[in-house]
Amino acid sequence: TIKQFGKEVLIQNISEELPFFKFKIDYIIEKYNVIQPEELNKAVLEIVEFFAQSSDEILIGEYIKIVAERLKVTHESIIAKYKNAKLKSKRQYTENNAYVTMTY
């Protein structure tokens, strides 16, 4: 956000045409001290929850590889967390739909 990073960073990102996924991943990783295992886990969880909101599986697959390499964790561990996040996201959607349907 502009408050956090300032107008200059926003302008730089726009001028460099930084892809939104990369920007979001960078933002999440910078929030945590990923040297610590607990913080690393929090960062990965937040990233895969973000990924779970997308339906572009090819894009997600490529970014999972990038995140795994950057954070020095296995590709498989991120995929497992992504699948759990995607399942959780679908369950919440189904529960919310059922609730909305019942209120009519």
Image (spheres, rainbow, N blue to C red):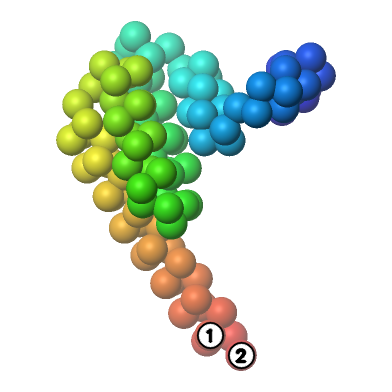
Q: Please tell me the numbered disc located at residue 101.
A: 1
Q: Please tell me the numbered disc located at residue 104.
A: 2
* Quarter of image, res 65: top left
Q: Is residue 67 above or below residue 83?
A: above
* Quarter of image, res 27: top right
At 35% from the left edge and 26% from the top edge, which residue is drawn? 66
Measured in 3D between alpha carbons, the distance from the residue under mark 1 to the one under mark 2, in whole angstroms, is 6 Å
Q: Position of residue 38 (x, y in %)?
A: 32, 20
At 29% from the left edge and 25% from the top edge, which residue is drawn? 68
43 left or right, relative to 79: right
What is the three-letter code of the residue carrying label 2? Tyr
Query: Who is closer to the viewer here, 7 or 90?
Result: 7
Q: Position of residue 30 (x, y in %)?
A: 51, 16
Q: Please tell me the numbered disc located at residue 2.
A: none
What is the three-letter code of the residue carrying label 1? Thr
Residue reaching furthest to the top:
35
Judged from the image, the secondary structure of the residue bearing numbered disc 2 is loop
Residue reaching furthest to the bottom:
104
Quarter occupied by the C terminus? bottom right
Other residues around mark 2 within 10 Å, as few (<14) / some (14–19) / many (≥20): few
Quarter occupied by the N terminus? top right
Query: Who is closer to the viewer here, 1 or 101?
Result: 1
Q: Are marks 1 and 2 in contact (CB under 8 Å)?
A: yes
